[in-house]
Image (cartoon, rainbow, N blue to C red):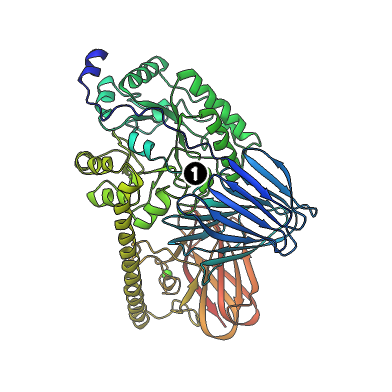
Amino acid sequence: MRTLTSLVAAMVIIGAEAASLPWPFDMKIVSVSGGADELRIVTTGAQFVFHSGTGEVDLWQRIGAQRQVGTLALGARALRGLTVASHDGEQVKLQTPRGLALTVTNDSVLRVEANRALTLDLRGDIKPEYLHAEQYGLLALDPKGGLAAFPIPRLDTHPNIATTPRGFQWQQALPAGATLLVNVCPPREYNWQQHAGERIVHQFPTELQPGLSDRPLPTDEELVEWRKWGNVLILHLEFWDGFGIKHIKPRDPVRFRQVVDLAHKLGFKVLPYSSTYYYTPAQLPGGKYKPDAAAMYLEEAKWLLDEYKVDGLYWDGEFMDVLQSWECIREVRKVLGARRLYVHCTTMPLPSTHLYCPFINTWADYLLRGEGQRRNTVDPMYLRYVVSGYNISNAIGELCYDTCRVTEQVCDQALQANVRLPYWPGLQHHSGVDYFLHPDEKKTFQEYYIPRADHVKSARDYAPLAAAGKKTRAARVQELARQDVTDREAIATYVAQRKRDVPSLTAGNLAAYAPGLCSDYCRRREGPQGLGYPPAYATDQDPNTYFAIDGLPQWYAVDLGPAQSISRVWLQTYFGDRRYYHYRLDTSTDGKEWQPLAEKMTDALSTQQGDTYTFPARSARYVRVTILHNSANDAGHICEIGVYH
Ligand SMILES: [Ca+2]
């Protein structure tokens, strides 16, 4: 082995070590002013104006753009007698004589604790380019910022978002005891100095088997080589001694200290693997966490930082609980100070790849998203509004390119979205995908991506890329609209032909080849015809094709045309791999009023025979299936539905 001195002398440094950076985590309560009628709270990123006469709260953005992004109406009498209960640099607590408690926090969140049933009425004053709503909440964003809202616990139904002349409106009943979080984005400034001065080298072991890696830590030569491509070193799973232990420890502490020392000499910041998601001592059975989960994890974090004198933490996931995840990241930031936090959160803390919490993300330096997107390319809308934190959380977004891979097109689109690509050395192959750069990708990364990324050091440098990104996304929206038209035509042709060739599977099936409505459907370019999994597959008389939709609960309804008398429904959900579904059935004559019909809430497995329900004859035009749960994944699948007189 060469000596350390010769290695240091031989290395090529990508740039002088960035000086100690001015830290953006000084989010604070800037001021509280006004009186009983109009109370004004200014945070680093937002202004909340409470009108006790109307029960409305104006939501103003202060970073990225200075504008009103929306209004939260809590009911005419809801804010009467509003007073400040307490006030410090981190939060302002407000209360009313009727017991409504509101809190404004320094990360620009308005938290409402509904002490009685409330009607949430959130009116958006922007026309968002990205509007995504699930039962967990809503993100309404444009390139300058926007707002987000999260009901806790999640809603029972999908939120119904209406388009209005000013933007959008979300009206929803909030039960007593619910919490609502409304976040104005972004809560803090983007740190261009950090963006320009720091690059991630994310090292994976050869094998992803905790405790069994045959290549536990990088060699001195690798560290020297990798320093050309970054200066923030992530030491991934090889650091891990297994699940469920109190502290995540290196398997070879002596070598680990050598690696940290050499990395420091080379000018790396070192971020070892850690995880709140996998921190099993904080977990309770059933996917819940202990009430003091954040405090427990904090002990782990402090131990790691003190024991090995590292420069921050890499989190492999977050607690799957919004409030505990939020508490934990705020507390960890206090412990870290100016040290770094890099969080992988493709789906966390919400089980969604398209909905996330900017007020949690904002406490991290870098975010990693995009894992398992099952695409060869990456959707520019997803890149800009999910992977990128720019003008949203203002954390630096890094793309996890396990499936989308590093091509010149992906590099271009990442740059347009202000998303960065970490450098992935190693040879880790996991779940059929590679968590490392192939040789040709390495060339693209080094020769195509790096020079272009190095050019972007400020908002001014990014501006032309942002303009190009807007065009790319507009073109993509048009392309998808064209695809939708072609897909609908192709599906109609398929159904018409099959209807001619194949009679109904069962006699008297009123639903055979009937059209369907649904809350949404899976449009991935997959499925038997490459057309996704449209409603037509639930009535095409082929048990091998199925309607599919992600993110339960979701619904599908077969449309029988005219209302008619029915007394039997047969439902075949996806079967054959020992899975089961929970669902409810109801019927309607007009698509507005629904009458309950049946439910399946047992864990009886799906079978080819399906489930049959007979009942006293009733009139129906629609039979709706609301899929609540799937034991195999978070998606609903209907192979066939039959409806009979
Ligand atoms: Ca089918």
Residue 105 in sight: yes
The residue labelled by disc 1 is 188
Q: Residue at x 40, y 18 (%)?
A: 252
Q: In terms of depth relative to the viewer, which is nearer, 458 or 568?
A: 458
| Dot 1 beta carbon under 8 Å from ligand 1 | no
* The N terminus - image quarter: top left
Residue 167: where, in percent of width, then height? 51, 67
What is the quadrant of residue 523 in the picture?
A: bottom left
> Ligand 1 falls in which quarter?
bottom left
Residue 582: where, in percent of width, then height? 58, 60
Q: In terms of depth relative to the viewer, which is nearer, 296 or 596?
A: 296
Residue 404 in sight: no
Three-letter amino acid code at the position of disc 1: Arg
Secondary structure under the numbered disc 1 in the rendered image: loop
Note whether 375 is above or below 623 in the view shown. Answer: above
Note whether 481 is above or below 32 in the view shown. Answer: below
